[in-house]
């Protein structure tokens, strides 16, 4: 359908539209008009992504003189694939209705690991070794050598891509990662470098958060994005965590040992160069004397991870004299590593601010702040000079330099925490020195400043006024939408006790109670016998899941559960988890049904949908609080209290409940879908916890469902499933309309668009 | 297994079912005169037997021709290969899947008095072990029976299981160090890991969590926050890790195997054959995968289907089942209603009726006419009686004529009116004539003496039927004789053609 929102003709690839999608578009359009940032919470299962894509592409089409670019950031690669698949549908529709004028270029961008098509490179085990294997074939000095000596291997795809020069472009269209690989194979061009190149010209770029938020990556990929871009952070409920993680580094004993090895390897290289090719070292020195570590742009194959500090905080001046010579720099690094080693030998927990840490480095190792600050640039320059290609071997020294640069750059918003062992396993010595960022607004500030509109959206942004404080920005629009439902297709319940009326909870003192484990087991057992198709269970942590599954196995509950449905489990091994998910889907597809055990805050909770028959019930066992004794968490809470006036308890509850809401929200995809959500913990019945849930869940949480036992929940589940099995009127005949056609929209915009209230 | 049909020209037919035994002497005689004989596997015989039991008409024919000596057993079935094959598929016994529950029988049982534990392994369990633990499967193929006996093998396996059940990784490591074969059972399964990598290539990209890890530069080693109370404590890496058993992994593996189902179809008695069959089926699977090029495309279409929001667009057309009228009468009866409706419409004339009345208007109209009738009664009849009776007649005529002209095909109506005796005779003659003619014409050109004797026999039988048909024609009552002769006509003609 196509309709007008003020001056923009919106092309929407479906015959109908949900009223909240329409309202969402209206708000979004206002933000685009105002060239400001916005914050929009819309329930999952209301087609948020397609509404976003549809409005922004239509907006760009309606203003051809100054088209805006869309940078769409997703949390995960699989979400990226999903977004691009939706965009494909939309693009086909727009081209069908507008002709070739509507053609756009949309690319997804990922790492070499996911895009490389050179079989010898991509066979490497992990991301870092793929990157290194690629550099071994594509670095400028390797290629220069290969010109003279044909026995030196290069990458045919990269060579072809380089040879094609400016010819090498992607024709308009929507390219998923798979499409890029296919296109690359067809043409014989490297899809990774092609995609990186095309990112500048594409109308829509889809990539993961860190390509904008993490300066290490953003410095390479997103340097040249135009200001007239709309940046969208989808599923942004965890964006503050991504931001602080992007600026945090930790140092362990293994890191230091590895760094020592790296340093000695580099000093050997330096000796070798001195003997054979001293000119290169001298040239580097001269370059450093003249000015910056790097000038101009490197050949595309030479780029490596960028400076860990934010671009505006990087000093644009000459590298200090004491680290210009390669040997001097190495000795600086040696002293730094030595100092860090001595700090790791502590017996007690220590917490320090960056300022005092830098002071003590200066006092004990004789390194001043400026030297520390230039560590990253100097290392990078040295590695280029030494023509090091196996970058995966040099990650340790890279870590140390990242640490030094960050600690030298930022005086506030960070703290340094040294722990001799993990709080939870005090008997195992594992000293760690962490530079942890507490201020989420640091990493995201450049994004807010650079781009005219930043859209932060998710199904769970409650309380919505907290995010502007955490991220320190002023949204022009900040709105939370509720869900207009044709029928009550979601059924949240709070289960506080088992059939034996004993309370259930994952509270620390009750967690190991066998009665709780049994009651949780009975709950699942009863549910698998009633609920058809897929059931998803979320636990508060891996260790808790492991413990409870073992208990269920020993008591025989697991066996009984498996009589009804197959059981699949998320583990810490991503390959195994992926296969388990794939099998889970197949089990649901064939009608047999299955149970998936997963972890809140885990990879599955982050972005896998359990819509339709893949999830008719989701059980959240416990409240997914963070481990509150964690030193880093305590430091962050303290920072939040001092700087943003956010109370510790409030933040913890907010954080736990957004995770819980995120978990249970995965079951709904559209209004034709239906699903039940059980919050199995007595603490959910308390108002202060419950009220932090997003409005669209709360509005369906009836008072009668607030304090249930297993048998009552079972009864409700039966009733609910029976009700959902009945045919119903999709358009919502009784009073409120939940599905709008083109005519409805036209009628509405003739009147006032504002009188649609949700 | 099904060597019966293909390996055609062999000696004796060994049909062994009771129904045939009665006529054994006859069939023996038949067999003597018929050169192309076949050896019949008991399974094949059984299959024919069940077919005959299920289909009385077929049994009748069989009795008439085979026992009557007109056709041989082989000839009779030769024209019904399809039936046999179809039956073959249907009767192949349903494959049982694996049990959903994990193998729990393999838990050691201690008798409490001695220091001995007992394990029970059934063929079923062994099969499941092979399917879930490729390393054990491979070891079995490698070691048994060259290096150790089967009993020894399983004893060793059970020892490993026992070690696992004690959850003592260190003890397991010590034992494994001493015994190379035991180590196979105790260590992590390498084959599983390589299989997992292979399967990853086929995974739906919208589920691929591994791809994320490849894209995540924030979590370079030692970057990001490592100990903030969100991330789990990494299990300490120790030397004994590979001897630890992970229940979660086992559960996933088990569910995957159950989902895949049983891939082999052999009796479970002999462990060796099971192991070999499993190895073969795995190789086949590998070969299939290599040739499976368009699975990728399929995957993509599946994703695009998944992304669509179903209730925002019109429902896709439901798949259409082709029209298949089993009994035409049902169809024509239902058409009657339609016919009546058209008639009704023509009777009211082509007057355009304004359907766009509002409820209010309709209501007021009805009220008016009701009050009219109340006050005046029905003075003016709506139609004149003459016309009414005419309409009625034409309507009823229409009904009866559709019933007799359209509703039933001629033959059936006639057949219904015949005495049941005659009807059945006619029908059975009809089928037997068809059978005879089929055989008769299929014997042309007559090239071998065998065929000529067959044709002669068939001719005799046909002449026989011919006479019987004449008999029927004469036996029926005079009013039906015409109908019957009409029916018999095509039969006689086709027979005449042959004779």
Image: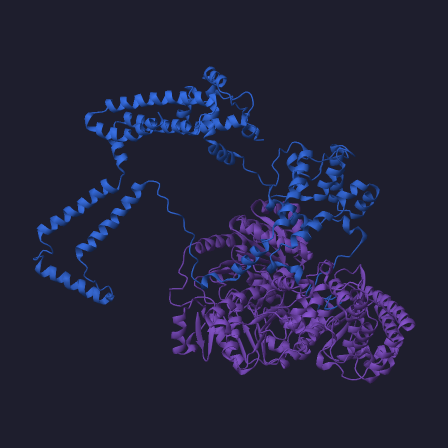
- State the image quarter where residue A738 is shown: bottom left
**A543 vs B173: above or below:** below
Chain letter, purple in picture: A
Give residue B383's position: percent from left, percent from top: 11, 55
**B316 vs A162: above or below:** above
Q: Quadrant of the N terminus of chain B?
A: top right
Work out whether residue A319 or residue A446 is closer to the camera in this orientation and state it.
A319
Give residue A551's position: percent from left, percent from top: 66, 49
Give residue B7's position: percent from left, percent from top: 57, 28
Residue B359 in sight here: yes
Give residue B422's position: percent from left, percent from top: 28, 25
- State the image quarter where residue B467 is shown: top left
Residue A540 in sight here: no
- State the image quarter where residue A132 is shown: bottom right
* Residue drawn at (53%, 24%) of the image: B38
Colour setting: by chain
Horizontal side of residue A497 vs A303, given as left or right: left
Toward the right, the furthest residue is A275
Q: Drawn colour of chain B?
A: blue
Work out whether residue B303 or residue B294 is closer to the camera in this orientation and state it.
B294
Q: Quadrant of the C terminus of chain B?
A: top left
């Amino acid at each position: 359908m196509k309709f007008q929102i003020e001056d923009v003709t919106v092309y929407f690839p479906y015959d109908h539209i949900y009223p909240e999608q329409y309202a969402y578009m209206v708000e979004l359009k206002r933000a685009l008009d105002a060239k400001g940032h916005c914050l929009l919470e819309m329930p999952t299962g209301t087609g948020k992504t397609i509404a976003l894509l549809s409005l922004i592409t239509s907006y760009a089409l309606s203003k051809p003189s100054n088209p805006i670019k869309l940078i769409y950031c997703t949390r995960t690669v699989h979400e990226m694939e999903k977004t691009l698949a939706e965009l494909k549908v939309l693009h086909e529709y727009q081209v069908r209705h507008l002709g070739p004028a509507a053609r756009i270029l949309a690319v997804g961008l990922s790492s070499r690991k996911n895009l490389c098509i050179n079989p010898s490179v991509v066979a490497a085990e992990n991301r870092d070794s793929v990157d290194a294997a690629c550099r071994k074939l594509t670095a400028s000095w390797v290629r220069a050598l290969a010109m003279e000596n044909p026995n030196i291997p290069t990458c045919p795809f990269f060579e072809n891509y380089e040879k094609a020069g400016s010819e090498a472009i992607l024709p308009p269209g929507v390219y998923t990662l798979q499409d890029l690989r296919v296109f690359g194979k067809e043409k014989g061009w490297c899809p990774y470098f092609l995609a990186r190149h095309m990112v500048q010209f594409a109308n829509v770029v889809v990539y993961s958060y860190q390509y904008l938020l993490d300066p290490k990556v953003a410095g390479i990929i997103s340097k040249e994005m135009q200001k007239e871009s709309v940046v969208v952070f989808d599923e942004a409920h965890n964006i503050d965590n991504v931001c602080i993680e992007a600026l945090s580094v930790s140092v362990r004993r293994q890191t230091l040992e590895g760094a020592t090895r790296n340093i000695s390897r580099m000093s050997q290289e330096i000796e070798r160069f001195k003997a054979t090719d001293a000119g290169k070292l001298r040239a580097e020195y001269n370059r450093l004397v003249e000015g910056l570590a790097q000038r101009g742009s490197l050949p595309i194959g030479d780029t490596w991870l960028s400076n860990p500090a934010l671009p505006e905080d990087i000093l644009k001046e000459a590298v200090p004299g004491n680290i210009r010579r390669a040997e001097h720099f190495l000795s600086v690094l040696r002293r730094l590593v030595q100092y860090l080693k001595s700090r790791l030998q502590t017996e007690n927990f220590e917490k320090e601010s960056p300022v005092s840490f830098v002071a003590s480095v200066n006092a004990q190792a004789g390194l001043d702040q400026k030297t520390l600050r230039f560590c990253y640039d100097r290392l990078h320059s040295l590695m280029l000079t030494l023509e090091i290609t196996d970058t995966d071997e040099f990650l340790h020294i890279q870590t140390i330099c990242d640490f030094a640069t960050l600690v030298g750059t930022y005086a506030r918003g960070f703290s340094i925490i040294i722990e001799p062992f993990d709080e939870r396993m005090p008997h195992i010595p594992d000293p760690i020195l962490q530079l942890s960022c507490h201020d989420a607004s640091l990493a995201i500030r450049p994004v807010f400043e650079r781009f005219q509109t930043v859209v932060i959206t998710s199904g769970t942004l409650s309380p919505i006024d907290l995010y502007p404080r955490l991220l320190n920005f002023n949204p022009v629009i900040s709105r939370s939408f509720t869900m207009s439902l044709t029928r009550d297709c979601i059924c949240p319940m709070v289960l506080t006790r088992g059939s034996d009326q004993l309370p259930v909870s994952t509270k620390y003192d009750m967690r190991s109670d066998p009665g709780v484990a049994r009651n949780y087991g009975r709950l699942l057992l009863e549910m698998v016998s009633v609920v058809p198709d897929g059931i998803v269970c979320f636990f508060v942590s891996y260790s808790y899941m492991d413990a409870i599954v073992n208990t269920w196995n020993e008591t025989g509950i697991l066996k009984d559960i498996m009589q009804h449905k197959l059981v699949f489990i998320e583990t810490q091994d991503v390959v195994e988890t992926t296969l388990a998910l794939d099998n889970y889907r197949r089990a649901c597809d064939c009608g047999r049904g299955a149970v998936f055990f997963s972890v809140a805050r885990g990879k599955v909770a982050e972005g896998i949908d359990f819509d339709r028959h893949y999830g008719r019930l989701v059980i959240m066992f416990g409240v997914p609080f963070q481990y509150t004794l964690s030193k880093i968490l305590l430091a962050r809470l303290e920072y939040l209290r001092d700087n943003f006036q956010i109370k510790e308890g409030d933040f913890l509850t907010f954080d736990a409940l957004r995770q819980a809401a995120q978990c249970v929200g995965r079951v709904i995809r559209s209004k034709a879908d239906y699903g039940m959500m059980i919050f199995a913990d007595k603490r959910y019945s308390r108002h202060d916890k419950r009220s932090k849930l997003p409005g669209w869940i709360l509005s369906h949480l009836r008072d009668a469902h607030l304090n249930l036992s297993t048998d009552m929940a079972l009864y409700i589940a039966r009733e609910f499933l029976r009700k959902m099995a009945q045919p119903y009127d999709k358009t919502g005949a009784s009073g409120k309309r939940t599905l709008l056609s083109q005519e409805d929209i036209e009628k509405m915009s003739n009147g006032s668009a504002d009188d649609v209230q949700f | 297994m099904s060597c019966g049909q293909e390996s055609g020209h062999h000696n004796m037919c060994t049909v062994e079912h009771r129904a045939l035994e009665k006529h054994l002497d006859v069939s023996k005689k038949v067999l003597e005169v018929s050169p192309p004989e076949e050896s019949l596997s008991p399974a094949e015989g059984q299959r024919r037997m069940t077919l005959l039991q299920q289909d009385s008409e077929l049994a009748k024919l069989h009795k008439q021709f085979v026992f009557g000596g007109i056709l041989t057993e082989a000839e009779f079935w030769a024209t019904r290969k399809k039936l046999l094959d179809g039956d073959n598929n249907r009767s192949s016994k349903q494959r049982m899947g694996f049990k959903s529950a994990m193998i729990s029988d393999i838990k050691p049982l201690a008798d409490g008095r001695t220091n001995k534990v007992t394990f029970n392994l059934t063929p079923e369990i062994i099969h499941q072990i092979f399917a879930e633990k490729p390393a054990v499967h491979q070891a079995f193929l490698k070691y048994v029976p060259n290096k150790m006996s089967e009993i020894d093998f399983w004893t060793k396996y059970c020892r490993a299981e026992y070690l696992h059940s004690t959850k003592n990784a260190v003890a397991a490591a010590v034992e494994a160090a001493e015994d190379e074969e035991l180590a196979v059972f105790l260590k992590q399964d390498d084959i599983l890991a390589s299989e997992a990598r292979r399967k990853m290539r086929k995974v739906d990209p919208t589920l691929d969590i591994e791809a994320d890890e490849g894209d995540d530069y924030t979590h370079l080693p030692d970057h990001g926050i490592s100990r903030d109370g969100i991330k789990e404590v990494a299990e300490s890496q120790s030397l004994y890790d590979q001897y630890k058993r992970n229940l979660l992994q086992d559960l996933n593996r088990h569910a995957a195997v159950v989902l895949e189902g049983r891939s082999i179809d052999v009796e479970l008695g002999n462990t060796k054959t099971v192991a070999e069959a499993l190895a073969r089926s795995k190789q086949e699977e590998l070969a299939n995968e290599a040739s499976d090029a368009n699975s990728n495309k399929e995957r993509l279409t599946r994703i695009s289907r998944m992304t669509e929001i179903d209730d925002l667009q019109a429902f896709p057309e439901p798949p259409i089942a082709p029209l298949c009228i089993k009994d035409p009468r049902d169809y024509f009866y239902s058409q009657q209603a339609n016919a009546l409706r058209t008639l009704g419409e023509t009777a009211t004339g082509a007057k355009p009726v304004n359907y766009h009345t509002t409820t209010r208007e309709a209501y007021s109209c009805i009220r008016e006419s009701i009050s009219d009738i109340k006050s005046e009664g029905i003075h003016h009849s709506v139609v004149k009686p003459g016309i009414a009776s005419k309409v009625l007649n034409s309507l009823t005529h229409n009904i009866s004529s559709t019933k007799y002209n359209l509703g039933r095909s001629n033959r059936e109506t006639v057949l219904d009116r015949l005495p049941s005796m005659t009807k059945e005779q006619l029908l059975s003659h009809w089928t037997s004539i068809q059978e005879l003619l089929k055989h008769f014409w299929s014997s042309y050109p007559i090239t071998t003496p065998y065929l000529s004797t067959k044709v002669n026999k068939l001719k005799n039988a046909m002449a026989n039927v011919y006479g019987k048909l004449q008999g029927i024609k004469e036996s029926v009552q005079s009013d039906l004789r015409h109908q019957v002769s009409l029916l018999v006509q095509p039969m006689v003609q086709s027979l005449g053609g042959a004779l």
